Amino acid sequence: MTTETRDIPRRPRVIASRAPTDLTVDSWTIAQTRSALRQHLDGDFSRSALLADAMRADERISADLRTRVMAVTGLPFRIDPSPAGDQRRAKAIAAELSAAWSTICPSATARTLLRGAAFMGVTFGPVRWEASGGRWWPRVEPWHAQHLRLDATRDTWQAQTTTGLEDVVPGDGSWIVYQPEGQRAWIDCAVRGLAIPYHLRTFARRDWGRFSEKHGLPITGAVVPEEADVEDKDDFFRDLRTLGSEGIVLLPRDREDRGFKLEMIEPKNVGSWKAFEAALYHCDVSIAVALLGQAATAQEGGSYAKAQALAAYRQDLLEAEAVALAEMLREQVLRPWARFNFGDAELAPVLVWDATPPEDAGQLATTLSTAGTALATWQSAAAAQGYDLDFEAIAQRFGVPIRRRQT
């Protein structure tokens, strides 16, 4: 939603309220998860935000989330002048903003916004303003989503602060609300889709551990003759209990080959471990699809370059997220900044995280080589038929810079 200039006051409103202490819950049952997600659908994130925090303890979820977030913040970044108004003035304003951007919204803050939006569908926080050097300077301060709720009767966001509930109006210079998926963005979020894979991974690992314990430590069966003395039986059992890793136990037998014996009793379903592996693989794919838009091979988080090399984060989603973040910050932070300092919100510079795929030099060289070979062939064929090729047009088609020879 674009805030009109008339909705932005001439001076920033100082927000004195603070967020309550963030809570954490690291253990979740299925019933608790279902309850939290039901509240989430109603616009109450007090529990689902805590569930999202717990999910980030899973190394696969954490790695894919890190890959997604850093793919965006690792993009080439620039601040362009506003296309509106006097361009000399717009360029000066953009240069002034560029010098202070690292304190307005540093990369760590941008990553926090992206993480919250990926998991919850929405993230928010106040904009803190300070006067310095004759200018008002903003600082974006993301809050944990557990302090955000939707008042459905008024269709208004509310923040739980240390002084009570406060309306959140994005774009007036006091608050930001980031919803990359648009209205009701919290419906399309990772915390809902990852609930089942998160629990299934936990259960599969637990059960696989128990399975390995049973097969790695088979049951020892003690066979004793019925007529053996009670004292001999007790001694035999005592030796077995203290066997440990020694691997040696006395097995006395009589002349008829009757006596004590050991039998290792092992479960028969030795191939069942594959079911656990398949379950974990299924969860890994589901997590990658939910966070990266496709089943990638990335096992660790990384930069934009790594995400490109592994094709981890789908290109169309990367481009859309980069645009959504830039538009939100311009509308809800930079337009008020331009209004407060220069009297015109339209002078707000334009933020660009450039998601244009890097050019493949090898592929380009192959294309140009093929085109050159084809050009020679067509030129010979055209000359035989009395035609000339438009060499300049072909060069422009393939982006080859040419110029006429000086005579």
Image (cartoon, grey):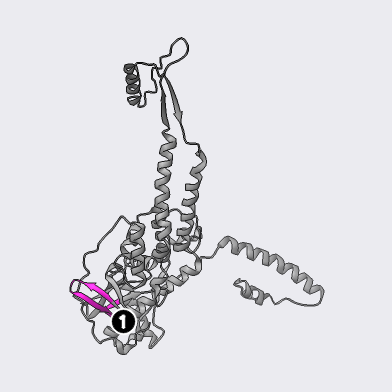
Q: Quadrant of the N terminus?
A: bottom left
Q: Which residues are magenta?
A: 158-175
Is residue 359 in view from this perspective? yes
- In the image, is 331 to the left or to the right of 394? left
Q: Residue at 25% across / 76% down in the picture? A: 137
In the structure shown, which secondary structural element does the residue marked by tag 1 occupy? loop
The quarter of the displayed image where residue 385 is located? bottom right
Q: Is residue 53 above or below residue 267?
A: below
How many marks the image carries: the answer is 1
What amino acid is found at the position of numbered circle 1 in the picture?
Answer: Thr
Give the residue number, with chain letter if any, for mark 1.
Answer: 153
Q: Which of these two is toward me, 283 or 355? A: 283
Q: Residue at 58% across / 60% down in the picture? A: 362
Q: Quadrant of the C terminus?
A: bottom right
Query: Crowdedness of circle 1 by 10 Å Cα count: few (<14), some, many (20+)?
Result: few
Q: Residue at 43% across / 39% down in the picture? A: 212
Q: Is residue 378 above or below residue 307?
A: below
Instruction: Give the residue at the far top of this rendering.
Output: 255
Q: Is residue 169 magenta?
A: yes
- In the image, is 307 to the left or to the right of 57? right
The quarter of the displayed image where residue 148 is located? bottom left
The quarter of the displayed image where residue 382 is located? bottom right
Q: Position of residue 269 (x, y in %)?
A: 50, 39
